[in-house]
Image (spheres, rainbow, N blue to C red):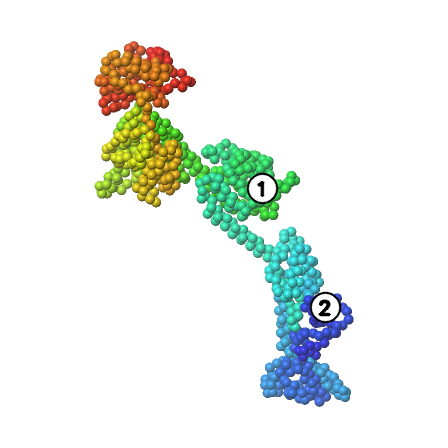
């Protein structure tokens, strides 16, 4: 009997260590069927667990052998036990009488088994309970003796409890519980494992992983078991996938493995705990999908809508969706809506034309393949196309509901259409109107779209639809604003007699490209030219509208041929009326006056204040006469013009600034400046020279410096000035009007004074005929003689004083007749019986234009004739005259 050291193994071969070829030293099962094996065994047998000790009684009933294990287990050294009555040695005093009778019976040759309390010290209380098995024996003399086996009852009860607990855990565990032997075959499985895989638990004893798992998973399981058995390192939560008997859905198990050891420390197998985590895995996937969806929506909210450009918004939507949500995607918008139509034909049934504005792919750069039922062939970005009426995409557009379109198998080759296995067609709805369609596609290898994906796609499309619709509306309004802005500015390359013109307009912000700055070049009678630059306070569309009204008023006043100061005075009254608050005067005027006088102002409504501020404006108005080379300036609170003469530095003209338009109450002054040929005149708005980054004086100096070196062609000089100045600050609009002076040559002017007498009519005809002949305009002689005769005759008949005749040749022929009378001629329709009254009618029929204007000493009546171009036919004077009767 073992006493804790190495002892020979039992004859049946159990418990061997270090057997050949097996992990942990355990012999293989087939080796146990051979002859008995004698080998050393480390402590850890069942006897060590149940704590068995032995001693023997001699014929005299006294202890003659006491094992070391008995000494350790009972706590009685051999020197106190040997030679003593066992009852006296360790039985309590109160039980000794009964114990002696039992010992006598034993020595009479009977076997006995019973529970005996024992004590560890003499005189002490019983502190243990031992189960003793007494077996009668004989000594060498043939006398009666006994061999006694002692078992600690407490150890037995512990083992029983452990076995019961182990059985309960093993049998009642909600997880699959298995024990693998060292040969990697099942020794035992619990009922949970048997329930999952079918059949009784005994069916699986001796089975390996290949008997209940798919091949690939079984190989993984086997490798893990072998690694745990060899290294002793546990494996936790290894994921295995398989099919439970009678089920079609794949299930997922989480398996944990750990090595089991005997009491001696040798490996005796591997325990496996397996839990079905299919539901947990599904919940994790759903939670991950929800987190991904929330992240996508958060990213979409942060990125989509940051631009008012249709294409940019569509591309941003696809950047968010690909590849986080799908593998390929495209955006189609109704072509009619992009063109400005509110409801293009066919939009309600989904058959209207669409334009592909964006495409994105994580798998290929090729265009998105069409869905089953759609028109064949992919659609490139920018292409206009239609969906067939019965196609899924047309149905999605028609019903405004998303549709999941399954993929199609194709035998045509490995093109992209053959690998797309799921497509979501999602209509883009904004303001209850379908504006387009988004297609999200997933290729094989990705999960097909489900209900959660559809809800997310609808939300993404809705957000993008609102932004795209806003961008579309902005684009439409922006285009309208640009049309308005461009219609209010003069056309490119305006022409003027005696002037070369170059102009530039830069909006303060590229987002609107409209503002309140304007410039204009207006042709006046006598080949004179009005140059206008103005700036309405404020920015954006309201300022542009106000600018258009003021520009129209300026043109109307300019055609009346008023003096510059009179034009600004009338324009000031108009601006006060446009920005008035219903009391006949502008609220802004009162505001300006109250600020200048230091007094308060009654509180106004926000709308009244807004309107009044819009119609405050500054303006500079200049009229250039190419004959006299003189330019007359009037200023309404604007920055002064800049004049550059040959070889001189740029000079700010000292033009009295006056009050801004709309303030009223102050007269405007004007000055006249002689402009030599070759001089450069620049009119501009404050956005060119004023910025928060530098003071106005510094900007004006930089502008003068840029102009001083602008001796190149006028268009190049204009670009040079803009490049030299800070024009990218985006704080205000910029208008720049530059004119280079060259005047009319002397030989292009005919100027004569005529006496107020009848013969001056013939003289005037003669002078006009000779001058036109010198200019080579013989085709205009007859018409000019007739009209000059009419105007001089009217001057003699209705005017007084000296008469002046002037002919001007430039791009047209202008004839002017001056007299000292202030009464303006009035055109009337003569009756058939009237002998006169048809002169001005004749002038209107034969000329390109005519009119009259006041002068400091009377008036001037003029007409204009187009120069012969060899193609148009001039009106026959005789036929025109006959048409009056």
Q: Split into 4 quadrants, where in the image is the C terminus? A: top left
Seen in the picture, residue 819 relative to 236 is either above or below; the reply is above
Circle 1: element type = strand
**Where is residue 580, by image quadrant?**
top left
At which x and y percent is residue 644?
32, 34
Circle 2: element type = loop
In terms of sequence position, does the residue under pointer 2 or pointer 1 come before the other? 2
Task: Give the label, 2 or 1, closer to the camera.
Answer: 2
| Residue 253 horizontal side relative to residue 9, left or right | left
| Residue 30 horizontal side relative to residue 444, left or right | right
| Residue 110 horizontal side relative to residue 664, left or right | right
Label 2, on which residue? Answer: 20
* CA separation in Å, label 2 and label 1: 64 Å
Q: Split into 4 quadrants, where in the image is the N terminus? A: bottom right
At which x and y percent is residue 74?
63, 82
Circle on res. 109: none
Residue at (28%, 28%) from the top-left corner?
Answer: 630
Label 1, on which residue? Answer: 405
């Amino acid at each position: 009997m073992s006493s804790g050291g190495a002892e020979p193994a039992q004859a049946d071969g159990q418990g061997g260590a270090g057997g050949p070829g097996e992990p942990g030293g355990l012999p293989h099962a087939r080796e146990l069927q051979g002859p008995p094996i004698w080998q050393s065994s480390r402590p850890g047998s069942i006897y060590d667990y149940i704590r068995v000790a032995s001693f023997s009684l001699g014929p005299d009933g006294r202890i003659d052998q006491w094992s070391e294990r008995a000494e350790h287990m009972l706590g009685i050294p051999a020197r106190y036990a040997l030679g003593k009555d066992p009852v006296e040695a360790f039985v309590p005093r109160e039980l000794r009488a009964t114990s002696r009778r039992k010992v006598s019976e034993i020595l009479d040759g009977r076997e006995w088994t019973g529970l005996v309390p024992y004590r560890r010290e003499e005189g002490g209380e019983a502190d243990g309970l031992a189960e003793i098995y007494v077996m009668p024996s004989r000594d060498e003399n043939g006398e009666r003796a006994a061999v006694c086996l002692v078992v600690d009852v407490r150890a037995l009860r512990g083992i029983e409890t452990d076995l019961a607990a182990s059985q309960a855990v093993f049998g009642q565990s909600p997880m699959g519980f298995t024990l693998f032997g060292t040969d990697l075959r099942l020794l035992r499985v619990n009922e949970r494992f048997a329930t999952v895989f079918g059949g009784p638990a005994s069916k699986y004893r001796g089975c390996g992983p290949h008997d209940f798992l798919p091949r690939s998973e079984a190989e993984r399981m086997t490798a893990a078991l072998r690694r745990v058995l060899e290294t002793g390192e546990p494996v936790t939560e290894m994921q295995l996938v398989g099919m439970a008997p009678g089920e079609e859905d794949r299930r997922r198990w989480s398996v944990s493995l750990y090595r089991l050891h005997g009491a001696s420390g040798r490996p005796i197998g591997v325990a496996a705990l397996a839990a079905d985590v299919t539901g947990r895995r599904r919940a994790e996937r759903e939670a991950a999908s929800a987190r991904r969806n929330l992240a996508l929506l958060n990213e979409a909210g942060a990125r989509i809508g940051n631009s008012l450009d249709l294409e940019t918004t569509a591309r941003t939507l696809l950047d968010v969706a690909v590849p986080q949500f799908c593998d390929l995607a495209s955006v189609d918008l109704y072509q009619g809506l992009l063109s400005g139509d509110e409801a293009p034909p066919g939009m309600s049934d989904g058959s209207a034309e669409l334009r592909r504005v964006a495409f994105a792919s994580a798998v290929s750069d090729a265009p998105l393949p069409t869905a089953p039922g759609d028109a064949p062939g992919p659609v490139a970005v920018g292409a206009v196309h239609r969906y067939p009426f019965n196609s899924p995409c047309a149905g999605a557009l028609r019903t405004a509901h998303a549709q999941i379109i399954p993929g199609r198998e194709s035998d045509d080759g490995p093109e992209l259409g053959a690998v797309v296995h799921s497509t979501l067609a999602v209509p883009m709805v904004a303001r209850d109107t379908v504006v387009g369609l988004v297609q999200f596609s997933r290729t094989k290898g990705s999960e097909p779209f489900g209900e959660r994906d559809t809800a997310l796609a609808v939300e993404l499309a809705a957000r993008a639809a609102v932004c795209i619709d806003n961008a579309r509306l902005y684009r439409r309004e922006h285009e309208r604003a640009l049309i308005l802005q461009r219609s209010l500015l003069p056309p490119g390359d305006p022409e003027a007699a005696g002037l070369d013109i170059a102009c530039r307009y830069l909006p303060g912000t590229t987002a609107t490209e409209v503002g309140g700055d304007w410039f204009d070049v207006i042709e006046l009678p006598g080949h004179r030219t009005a140059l206008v630059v103005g700036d309405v306070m404020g920015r954006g569309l309201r300022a542009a509208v106000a600018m258009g009204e003021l520009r129209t008023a300026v043109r109307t006043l300019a055609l009346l041929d008023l003096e510059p100061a009179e034009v600004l005075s009338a324009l000031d009254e108009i601006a006060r009326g446009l920005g008035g608050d219903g009391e006949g005067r502008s609220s802004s005027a009162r505001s300006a006056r109250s600020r200048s006088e230091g007094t308060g102002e009654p509180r106004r409504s926000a709308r009244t204040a807004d309107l009044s501020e819009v119609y405050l404006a500054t303006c500079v108005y200049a009229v250039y006469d190419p004959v006299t080379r003189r330019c007359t300036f009037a200023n309404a609170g604007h920055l002064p013009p800049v004049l550059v003469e040959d070889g001189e530095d740029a000079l700010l003209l000292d033009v009295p600034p006056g009050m801004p338009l709309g303030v009223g109450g102050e007269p405007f002054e004007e000055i006249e400046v002689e402009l030599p040929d070759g001089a450069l005149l620049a009119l501009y708005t404050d956005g060119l020279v004023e910025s928060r980054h530098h003071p106005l004086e510094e900007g004006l100096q930089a502008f003068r410096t840029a102009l001083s070196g602008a001796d190149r062609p006028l268009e190049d000089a204009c670009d040079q000035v803009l490049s030299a100045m800070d024009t990218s600050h985006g704080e205000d609009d910029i208008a720049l009007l530059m004119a280079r002076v060259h005047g009319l040559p002397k030989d292009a002017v005919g100027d004569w004074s005529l006496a107020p007498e009848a013969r001056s009519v013939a003289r005037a005809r003669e002078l006009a005929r000779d001058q036109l002949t010198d200019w080579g305009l013989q085709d205009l002689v007859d018409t000019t003689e007739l009209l000059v005769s009419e105007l001089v005759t009217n001057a003699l008949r209705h005017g007084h004083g000296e008469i002046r005749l002037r002919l001007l040749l430039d791009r047209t022929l202008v004839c002017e007749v001056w007299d000292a009378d202030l009464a303006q001629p009035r055109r009337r329709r003569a009756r058939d019986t009237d002998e006169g009254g048809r002169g001005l009618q004749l002038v209107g029929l034969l000329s390109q234009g005519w009119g009259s204007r006041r002068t400091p000493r009377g008036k001037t009546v003029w007409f204009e004739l187009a120069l012969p171009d060899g193609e148009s036919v001039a009106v026959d004077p005789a036929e025109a005259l006959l048409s009056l009767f």
